[in-house]
Amino acid sequence: MNIFEEIREDHKTQRSLLNTLLRTEGDSNDRRSVWEKLKVELMAHEMAEEKNFYNPMIEHDKSQEHARHSIAEHHEIDEMIKKLDDTEMSSSAWLTHFKSLRELVFHHLEEEEHEIFKVAGQVLNETEKERLAKDYRASMKRQAEKLN
Ligand SMILES: [Fe+2]
Ligand SMILES: [Fe+2]
């Protein structure tokens, strides 16, 4: 596995949780449990990705701007998560905010997989791609344990 495959796998989990949540209703156990799972996935992934993917990308002139742009989007996602946590889950505002978060994350994953991976592929060598994959997976596990 290389870093791209590891990240893609977790993106798949995020997409699936985002879609599952849309099928839940009001302030229910269902919605609460999917929301908690989704938050852990999103936050652990951001941290593991910044440490083991964007940090090495920042080292290269060619990929620095892309890395900064993505990290800025991570902050937007964090803000939206906070907003959702501060909103009554049974209100229609919660669902409106959630739909914005879903759009934001879908856009972000799409951009990473189609634009960022291309640039990263040009600056990281094969050994790095494999080493980062292992480091990413280990970070992901640590972060998820911390957040759970
Ligand atoms: Fe990301
Ligand atoms: Fe990502």
Image (cartoon, grey):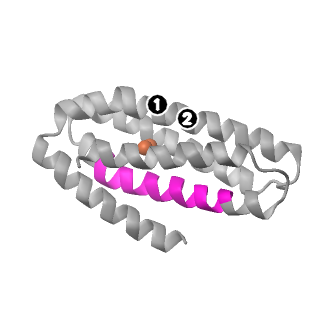
The image quadrant that residue 66 belongs to is top left
Seen in the image, is 121 located left or right of residue 23?
A: left
Determine whether the residue tagged by mark 2 lies in a helix, strand or loop. Answer: helix
Residue 110: mark in rendering: 1
Mark 1–mark 2 CB contact (< 8 Å): yes
Q: In the image, what residue type sits under mark 1?
A: Glu
In this view, 93 is above or below 38? above
Confirm whether residue 23 shows in the render: yes
Q: In the image, what residue type sits under mark 2?
A: Phe
Given the current orientation, which residue lies at the most extreme right position? 91
Q: Nearer the viewer, residue 70 or 9?
A: 9
Residue at 36% across / 46% down in the picture? 7
Is 6 covered by the magenta stretch? no
x and y percentages locating residue 38 in the rendered image: 59, 55
x and y percentages locating residue 116 in the rendered image: 34, 31
Residue at 38% across / 27% down in the picture? 114
Residue 106: mark in rendering: 2
Seen in the image, is 4 located left or right of residue 68?
A: left
Confirm whether residue 75 shows in the render: no
Residue at 50% across / 49% down in the picture? 13
Task: Pick the quarter of the image with the C terminus.
Answer: bottom right
Magenta stretch? 34-54
The tally of labels here is: 2
Residue at 32% across / 60% down in the picture? 137
In this view, 79 is above or below 120? below
Seen in the image, is 129 located left or right of residue 145?
A: left
* Picture quadrant of ligand 1: top left
The image quadrant that residue 27 belongs to is bottom right
x and y percentages locating residue 105 in the rendered image: 56, 39
What whole-number distance in Å separates the C-alpha atoms at marks 1 and 2? 6 Å
- Specify the principal SS of the magenta part: helix
